[in-house]
Image: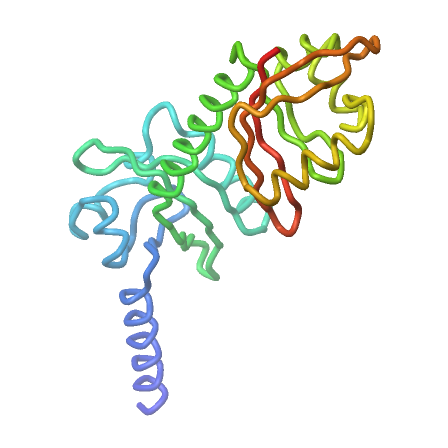
């Protein structure tokens, strides 16, 4: 009797741990049918528990998104732990992006842990679009745009900048130190010293050197910032 009571207490403790978990936890049989789900999984999918245990996992997977779970199941079939990212469909039809991992239990059923990463994915996509938009503006700007370290290494520039200095491409500029764009090193040093003091310069005139050695007068608007201890100069330039 004491052994039975001990097993019962262990099972109850196990169930309480699953129910209070911050991630969604589901138990599936070998065919993918839901056997159990904790409160977080029920909340995530929008079904009540009674509805969910009548369903198969594929019923909560969008029709155009089966591959990610098939990959996860294939790993499980090989005796390993399955982990993947993909979409699940809620009862209301809204797709939820999840990070899922699963293991095979001793009885052959599968336990899956599901984390809702929709907000993280949305933030990543917004960042990607923002970076894409910035890069498009940067690359296609009619004004010459540049970034370099005060140590003399170019970090970036656009085609307009390369064209002013008779370089074939921004990549060609990246291979050269900033000192090549001045006739005298002290001009560069004075420019950086002045920028450090003011932190930003507007309509600042520079006498610079093209690739073929010919001079060019340019007007620049520029600021200086610091990233992980490295001073970076950001500016636009007009011939």
Foreground pick, 224 / 56: 224
Foreground pick, 225 / 13: 225
Residue 73 appears at what percent x and percent y? 49, 41
Residue 4 appears at what percent x and percent y? 32, 84
Instruction: Determine whether 108 is above or below 149 in the image.
Output: below
Foreground pick, 81 / 1: 81
In which image quadrant can residue 18 be found?
bottom left
Q: Residue at x 69, y 37 (%)?
A: 149
Tell whether 148 sits left or right of 221: right
Tell whether 45 sits left or right of 104: left
The residue sitting at the bottom extreme is 2
Foreground pick, 160 / 135: 160
Instruction: Determine whether 19 is above or below 179 in the image.
Output: below
Residue 200 appears at what percent x and percent y? 53, 36
Q: Quadrant of the N terminus?
A: bottom left
Instruction: Determine whether 109 is above or below 121 in the image.
Output: below
Tell whether 121 sits left or right of 194: left
Q: How is the image coloured?
A: rainbow
Q: Residue at x 50, y 17 (%)?
A: 136
């Amino acid at each position: 009797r004491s052994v039975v009571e001990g097993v019962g207490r262990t099972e109850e403790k196990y169930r309480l741990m699953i129910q209070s978990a911050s991630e969604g936890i589901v138990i599936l049989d070998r065919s993918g049918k839901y056997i159990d789900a904790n409160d977080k999984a029920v909340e995530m999918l929008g079904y009540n528990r009674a509805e969910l245990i009548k369903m198969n996992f594929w019923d909560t997977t969008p029709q155009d998104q089966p591959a990610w779970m098939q990959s996860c199941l294939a790993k499980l079939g090989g005796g390993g732990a399955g982990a993947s990212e993909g979409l699940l469909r809620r009862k209301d039809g809204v797709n939820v992006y999840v990070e899922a991992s699963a293991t095979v239990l001793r009885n052959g059923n599968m336990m899956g842990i599901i984390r809702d990463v929709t907000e993280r994915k949305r933030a990543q996509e917004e960042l990607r679009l923002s970076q894409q938009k910035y890069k498009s503006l940067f690359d296609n700007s009619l004004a010459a745009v540049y970034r370099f370290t005060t140590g003399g290494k170019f970090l970036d520039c656009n085609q307009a900048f390369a064209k002013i200095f008779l370089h074939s491409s921004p990549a060609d500029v990246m291979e050269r130190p900033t000192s090549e764009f001045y006739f005298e090193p002290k001009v560069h040093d004075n420019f950086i010293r002045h920028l450090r003091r003011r932190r930003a310069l507007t309509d600042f005139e520079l006498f610079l050197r093209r690739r073929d050695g010919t001079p060019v007068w340019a007007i620049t608007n520029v600021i200086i910032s610091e990233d992980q201890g490295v001073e970076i100069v950001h500016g636009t330039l007009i011939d």
